[in-house]
Amino acid sequence: MTQPQPRDVEILHVGGASPYDVVVGRDLAALLPDLLGSGVQRVALLYAGGLGALAQPVADVLAQHYDVLALGLPDGEQSKTSSVANDCWEALGEAGFTRSDAVVTLGGGATTDLGGFVAASWLRGVRVVHVPTTVLAMVDAAVGGKTGINTGAGKNLVGAFHEPAGVLCDVSLLQTLPREELVAGLGEVVKCGFIADPEILAIVERTDPAALTHDSAELRELVQRSIQVKIDVVVDDLREVGGRDGHPGREVLNYGHTMAHAIERATGYEVRHGEAVAIGCVFVAELARRAQGLDDDLVTRHRTAFSRVGLPTGFSGASYEELRAAMAVDKKSRGDQLRFVVLEGLATPRVLAGPSEEHLRAAYDVMVGLA
């Protein structure tokens, strides 16, 4: 079967010790062998179980060049467990995967996280190429080399840094994405506007939200700009050891995530990640207003930007005590001290360590009021 040829391709290069390319375009499956490189005999295609129709053309391309092991995974966060990872390891072992073989992931952020972790841990690291199928995965999980699974104590607490050999952001795959999932992915996009690229906010604020569709030039630009924000951050601070001149470094990508992860855990991951990020960003803006005088207009802009694209800005589904306890086991915490990425101004992020309970409770009360 003749494969569609890639169209309108944009290549974003990720530098550093293990450089790779993020390819944005349409009908990109034919590029997979180029990203996987030479010497690969077997490829494990790890895909979200509900995406069999999208996975088949990718499997067909791979089968022209490699022995393919297709492994369907549970959908969503249910895939990010040690038992699912173990099932993948056992399958790789039975198929005789060696250090020169590779993994391809196809799915949303959970599939990318789990598949990346399997690749990072199998034989202490094999090649992986990500094919994200959601806006969220394209702008967040697929780029930057963070992999992970969840535990009962919290989200992404077990994982590894493992950079991919390449990423194919095929926007044609977004055609089947439910509208609510596309909107949820915009949570990470708008976040990037606040922490680094104000033009993202300008595009959101001047574009009719209904026009942000899978095939729109506006969504394509928002995706590419958000990917570039992440590339710029991770190249400078791959392993989250800290930035320069007061910048939080890679930690800045967790803007809004301390509360977001607490909300996800409290609801059993029923709130979508991008929705939780939107709420978390509004929460932390309110916290920054109280803790260090963040400008009222910028705080209000958080509410209007996220709500404009259809995202929630409030949450009342858990008590302060429950969310406070969940935030205490966040990866950014140090000992008993909570740490939040906050803004001093637009695109001027800093770390706020150890905010007062008074300020935390006040921001929580606003979050509940906005629900």
Image (cartoon, rainbow, N blue to C red):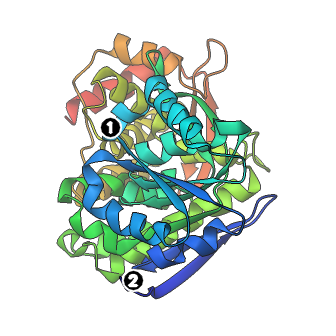
In the displayed structure, 157 sits above or below 46; it is above
In the displayed structure image, the side of residue 325 where residue 16 appears, left or right: right
Figure check: 152 above or below 23: above
Q: Nearer the viewer, residue 240 or 155?
A: 155
The quadrant the C terminus occupies is top left
**Label 1: few (<14), some (14–19) or many (≥20) C-alpha neighbours in 10 Å:** some
Which residue is labeled 1 in the image? 74
Residue 370 shown left or right of residue 351 in the figure: left
Residue 275 appears at what percent x and percent y? 30, 44
Tell me the quarter of the picture where residue 273 sits.
top left
Lower position in the chain sequence, tag 1 or tag 2: 2
Q: Amino acid at mark 2?
A: Gln
Of the pair 23 and 83, the residue shown nearer to us: 83
Where residue 15 appears, x then y in whole percent?
Answer: 75, 66
* Left or right placement of residue 229 versus residue 259 in this view: right
CB contact under 8 Å: marks 1 and 2? no
On the picture, is 266 further left or further right than 119?
Answer: left
Q: Which residue is mark 2?
A: 3
| Above or below: residue 28 compared with residue 134 | below
| In the foreground, 45 or 105 | 45
Please state the horizontal and vertical placement of residue 255, each as a whole percent of the image.
Answer: 51, 43
94 or 237: nearer the viewer: 94
- Disc nearest the viewer among 1 and 2: 2
Write the residue at 43% across / 88% down.
5
Q: Residue at x 40, y 47 (%)?
A: 299
Few, some or many residues within 10 Å of mark 2 (<14, 14–19, 20+): few
On the image, the x and y values in percent for residue 268 come to 29, 24
